[in-house]
Image (cartoon, rainbow, N blue to C red):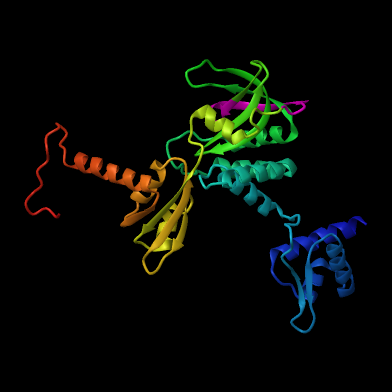
Amino acid sequence: MADTGNRTLRLLSLMQSRRHWAGGELADRLGVSLRTLRRDVDRLRELGYPVEARPGLDGGYRLAPGVALPPLVLDDDEAVALTVGLQAAAQTAVAGMAESSVRALAKVVQVLPARLRRRADALRAVTTTAAWSGEETVDPAALVTVAQACRDTERLRFGYAPAGGEPGERLVEPFRLVALGRRWYLVAYDLDRGAWRTFRLDRLTDPGSTGARFAPRALPGGDAEAFVREGVGVRSSTVAVEVRVEAGADEVRRSIGQWMTVEPDGPGRCTVRTLSDDLSWPAFAVGRLDAEFTVVAPLELRELVGAWGERFGRAAARAADGSRVTAPADAPR
């Protein structure tokens, strides 16, 4: 039975690695007869995997798209690559990607063998990820620990250095992780203070689960994101940004595709879209491109770019001593 189960997992891994397999080639890879292969394929179907068979000389098997994502089987290298990739994605500024990446990372790390975890940590240690700005970054390991504590309703202990306050140790009942702007926040019930609090993860050190379970409390208002926004004074809604850039989509995507959606809009032109609760960073992102651009929406971004342009123009015309700089007569205009 063990051999059958191992072979079924091996078959699943092979079918997920290639779109189409000839029956004979697949049987050879598994070291079984075609008849046994057919039984193994039927077993996968019983488990809910949509395996399609095509008869004939060019026939074989393929794993078809299903109505839901089935469990994936990864080899060692794939598991390490997935872990490192999710760690990097957890710090991205793409709307919605960071939180999903942390949830997926928590699931992968939980079942990752120690030898593979060491490989993933070693690879991450020698890899540098360029930050969007000079803001503090969050250790992915801390993100995973906090996410797992939220999921498992286990009390969490960590060091915390609040802005303008004395550092100290906190014991909390974690409720939700919230990605807001380019920062992570933990919404939790502070047991020492007897109140709900918001904690910035870049100010949090050495988080560790105590192993003590708790019954979840009701968050006032029930909305963790709204609770964080109110606590940190961030606007309650994001703004849709659309900018038309006079440059090819591939060129623009290489520069800002990590943070924005870039779509072709004719030869040598593209449209850039994103959602933001701070218009200064999309203004900077498109402004640093070596290309002309037009702000389609919102009006506030157009006004911000205009104000920046006027201020930069005054700065360019001003000498270090505050006097005006006179351009040479033959200077380009």
- For the C terminus, the quadrant is bottom left
Residue 190 colored magenta?
no
88 and 77: which is toward the camera: 88
Q: In which quarter of the image is residue 284?
A: top left
The correct choice, above or below, for 220 with respect to 111 in the image is above
- For residue 234, side relative to residue 196 (left or right): left
> Which of the 4 image quarters holds residue 173?
top right
Query: Residue 114, image x and y in percent?
Result: 72, 41
Residue 288 seen in render: no
Asked if residue 229 lies left or right of residue 102, the reply is: left
Residue 322 horizontal/vertical position (percent): 15, 32
Question: Vertical placement of 162 versus 175: above or below?
Answer: above
Pick the front one: 277 or 153 = 277
Q: Residue at x 16, y 38 (%)?
A: 318
Q: Which secondary structure is most common in the magenta stretch?
A: strand
The answer to if 206 sits in the magenta stretch is: yes
Q: In the figure, is residue 192 to the left or right of 41?
A: left
Picture coordinates of residue 290, whole percent (x, y)? 32, 55
Where is residue 73? Give x, y as percent.
74, 56
User: Quick one: 325 or 205, which is closer to the camera?
Assistant: 325
Which residues fall within the magenta stretch? Answer: 198-217
Residue 322 against residue 80 in the figure, above or below? above
Q: Is residue 197 above or below residue 118?
A: above
Task: Pick the quarter of the image with the N terminus.
Answer: bottom right
Q: At x 52% / y 45%, what residue is drawn?
A: 92
